[in-house]
Image (cartoon, rainbow, N blue to C red):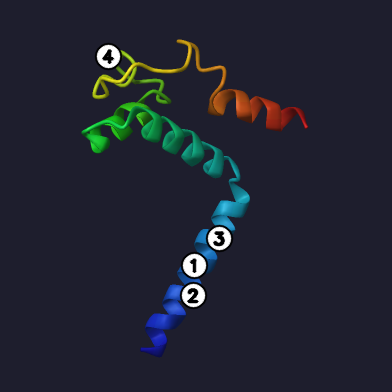
Amino acid sequence: MAVRILFQEELQDDHSMYMRQHPEIKCIMADFLQFLLLRKPEDTLNFAAEYFASFSTRAVETGAYATSTAPTPFPPSRTNTIMSLNAKANKS
């Protein structure tokens, strides 16, 4: 039991350190959750796959979030999402 607790604490420390080293993760996850909650897709797994594929340079263009039928409240550009947040963060 004690070994398991030590392993869990070590894993938690490792994850915390990684999050501190990569603060952009919080921005990426916040951006994703915002889109998910605004669009409310039936198939959240495909929505997530399409969302994160849009960051890939090898992504196949299938249209923005094809699994969600809700109209997007955002303009076609991604200037108000994670890319602009990272650009703003890098300026400061």
User: Which amino acid does the dot numbered 2 rest on?
Assistant: Glu
Which amino acid is tagged 1? Gln
Spot the residue most to the right: 92
User: 10 Å neighbourhood of mark 1: few (<14), some, or many (≥20)?
Assistant: few
Q: For this view, does 50 lie left or right of residue 19?
A: left
The amino acid on which the numbered mark 4 sits, given as a three-letter code, is Thr
- Left or right of residue 30, residue 91 in this image: right
In the rendered structure, the answer to whether residue 57 lies left or right of residue 18 reads left
Residue 16, compared with residue 2, is above or below; it is above
Q: Give the CA distance from mark 2 to mark 1.
A: 5 Å
The answer to whether the residue labelled 1 contacts the one labelled 3, judged by CB atoms less than 8 Å apart, is: yes
Real-space CA distance between mark 2 and mark 3, rounded to the nearest whole angstrom: 10 Å
Residue at screen point 35% across, 27% down: 39
Q: Which mark is residue 16?
A: 3
Q: Position of residue 51 (x, y in %)?
A: 36, 28
Per the image, the residue denoted by label 1 is 12
Give the crowd class for mark 2: few <14, some 14-19, many >=20 residues within 10 Å.
few
Nearer the N terminus, badge 2 or badge 3?
A: 2
The circle drawn on residue 62 is: 4
Q: Are marks 2 and 1 in contact (CB under 8 Å)?
A: yes
Please give the name of the residue rendered at 62% of the width and 30% of the height, measured from the top-left corner: 86
Three-letter amino acid code at the position of disc 3: Ser
Q: Earlier in the sequence, mark 4 or mark 2?
A: 2
**Label 1 vs 4, first from the N-terminus:** 1
When asked about the image quadrant of residue 79, the answer is top right
- Give the residue at mark 2: 9
